Image: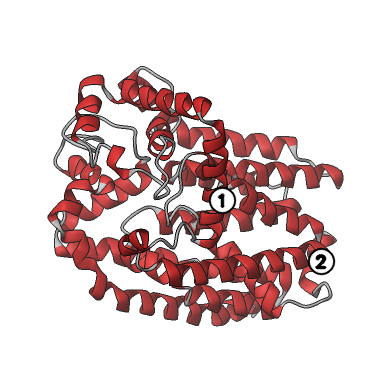
Amino acid sequence: MTEQQQTKNERLRAYGPMVAAALLVRLAVIPFLYREWLDPFLIEHWAFGRVARSLVTGHGFGNVFADTGPTAVLSPVYAYLLAGIFWMFGPHTRASVITALAINSLFSALTCIPVFLLARRCFGHRVAMWSGWLWAFSPYGIYYGADWAWSTCLLTLLLCCLFLIALKLENSGSLLHWTGFGLLTGVATLTEPVTLAVVPFLGAFTCYRRYRQRLTWLLPATAASLAFLAVLSPWIIRNYETFHQFIPVRSGLGLELYIGNNGYSARWVNSALHPNHSDAELEEYEKSGEVAYMEHKRQQAVDYIRAHPGWYVRMTLRRVLYIWTGYWSLDRAYLKDEPLDPPNILVATTFSVLALLGLRRVFRLDWAIGVRFAIVLGCFPLVYYLSHPETYYFRPVDPLLVVLTAVAIAGRAKKPAALQRLAHGG
């Protein structure tokens, strides 16, 4: 057995039990939670479910709020994955819902692998073991894997993989490796466009590091960019042919901006203004068409923000606090609708504080590694600060928070051998 094969076997023995334990605990939770996705009201307002049902019934990628035809409100990857499940087990059946949640649980469990490899590469075996097991039993990893039939778990896995690959590309000029990075970025972008808030910056920083080391960077970066465009182009062309307008991935930013910026502050978003909950908004959407409706919502939001800049600043700061701590209000009326907020505040705040302490230690160990973590933590939530957050929006960053938490708990005061090799191009 070669040394490389032995190393791979050692890694598999390390993270294999993590993946198995993570999957088992997530699957064990599904039977207690899946029934809510069979509720008729939720079925009617489950956007991915509506689009997936439209696909399998031969009506194309559309009907996201009602039977109104083609849409670009959602990105395509998870919708087509769900459509495949619906095709095999039937739309909105018990079997299809359980399968969707089981697949999401698998995505969440598999995230143990890049978490372990990333932590081991940067901080050594001890932190890698802490990181992998922390993710396996992360409350958010378990909950969103077992009870959230959305694209969150897939994006979490893809984003963590892209972070690890961008780190490795600093020492690789292989066009094949860089092309793979571009292809995977395209898939992640078509899963959720928020990918573009961080991955281009990670790639640019990798190019900068290669430039400083007098290594080739322009040709690899070009190969990655072309691969990315090759994945994205069919969807862009589809949207242009359908809506006669350039829509890179999704069309719904205007609506997201509007429902978060209209004077309402009892919660982080005014769901009553969404077409899923407002007959008047749905009627406008149906009459105006998707593109015109979204532009009108964008203009309404912009007009309100311009007329109330002080309110917008305060609301933005509240969103920042909410994303990092889970805190919005402790008012009794609010907590009646959000009874799980107090324990969530404790968990979210603890992870955030430990992660920021870990980030501080990382910067002391190696500034270049710290910059990469800071890029994600700083850039990923920006669009949600400015529009509106939801409880699951920040969850794709959780694996990196877990790694930083492990650094804070189990990290060494001195640079580990693995990080020393990385710093010297090993």
Residue pointed to by mark 2: 365
Q: Nearer the viewer, residue 348 or 181?
A: 348
Q: Is residue 179 visible?
A: no
Q: Residues within 10 Å of mark 2 (few under 14, many from 20)?
A: many
* Residue at point 79%, 74% (across, down): 416
* Residue at point 52%, 37% (across, down): 311
Q: Quadrant of residue 407?
A: bottom right
Residue most toward the top? 244
Q: Nearer the viewer, residue 337 or 288?
A: 337
Q: Which mark is residue 107?
A: none
Q: Is residue 37 visible?
A: yes
Amino acid type at circle 1 is Val
Amino acid type at circle 2 is Leu
Counting from the top left corner in percent of width and height, residue 219 is at 71, 35
> Which-is-in-front pick, marks 1 and 2?
1
* Residue at point 48%, 39% (across, down): 387
Counting from the top left corner in percent of width and height, residue 128 is at 64, 75
Q: Quadrant of residue 109?
A: bottom left
Tell me the quarter of the image containing the N terminus. Answer: bottom right
Residue 249 versus residue 241 in the image, above or below: below
Discs 1, 2 touching: Cβ within 8 Å: no
Q: Earlier in the sequence, mark 1 or mark 2?
A: 1
Counting from the top left corner in percent of width and height, residue 42 is at 20, 53
Q: Is residue 250 left or right of residue 420?
A: left
* Residue at point 28%, 72% (across, down): 30
Q: Residues within 10 Å of mark 1 (few under 14, many from 20)?
A: some
Could you say whether the residue bearing mark 1 is in a helix, strand or loop?
helix
Residue 57 versus residue 350 in the image, above or below: above
Q: Which mark is residue 320?
A: 1
